[in-house]
Image: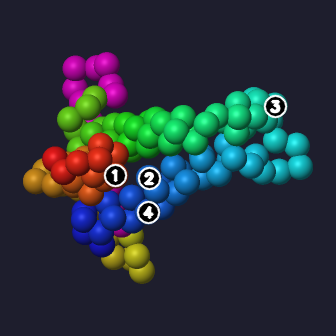
Amino acid sequence: MDADEFIASIKVAVHDSTICGTQAMLEHPSGRKPPEKIVQLSQWYNALPESDKDRVREVITLAVHGSVFGLLCVLDGVQVIESSVEKSDFELHQVREGARNIINGKNISLHDIYQSEVWNDVYGSKA
């Protein structure tokens, strides 16, 4: 798996599924006794006109994008999470059948690949 394949998988398994899952939870909370907060949000959401529901989905999309983008920035070393002077480098490896493959590296920008992959979905236009 290379960086492009990793990001394409993250788009489907994290980005898209979190947006859809959050909207589905708002429409129909799951479980025998969902948390009261979810029930209240669902009641509020379901009372909205369709145009406002569309706006809520846009906000969900922005929040998911910001979270995934921020995490990838940390992995890429362009956003720091440490307060010490010396900063760590983060390496993302795929390990399969004992073979170790690095996904990110000095010349690979996961956050830029992700941004180009989701830009139109998030912002509605090409970058």
Q: Nearer the viewer, residue 19 or 8?
A: 19
Res. 108 image quadrant? bottom left
Q: Alpha carbon of mark 3 to alpha carbon of mark 1: how far?
A: 31 Å
Question: Sequence order check: which comes first, mark 2 or mark 3?
Answer: 2
Question: Sequence order check: which comes first, mark 2 or mark 1?
Answer: 2
- Mark on residue 121? 1
Q: Residue furthest bottom?
A: 97
Q: Alpha carbon of mark 1 to alpha carbon of mark 4: how far?
A: 12 Å
Give coordinates of residue 39: x percent, y percent.
78, 35
Give coordinates of residue 95: x percent, y percent.
38, 70
Residue at horizontal 48%, vertical 61%? 13
Q: Amino acid at mark 1?
A: Asp
Q: Is residue 74 left or right of residue 30?
A: left
The label nearer to you, 3 versus 1, is: 1
Q: Residue under circle 2?
A: 15
Give coordinates of residue 120: x percent, y percent.
27, 52
Q: Alpha carbon of mark 2 to alpha carbon of mark 1: how far?
A: 10 Å
Mark 3 surroundings: few (<14), some (14-19) or many (≥20) residues within 10 A: few
Give coordinates of residue 59: x percent, y percent.
46, 35
* Secondary structure of the residue carrying numbered label 4: helix
Residue 124 in sight here:
yes
Q: Alpha carbon of mark 2 to alpha carbon of mark 3: how far?
A: 26 Å
Magenta span covers which residues?
Answer: 81-94
Q: Residue under circle 4?
A: 12
Q: Amino acid at mark 3?
A: Glu
* Secondary structure of the residue carrying numbered label 1: helix
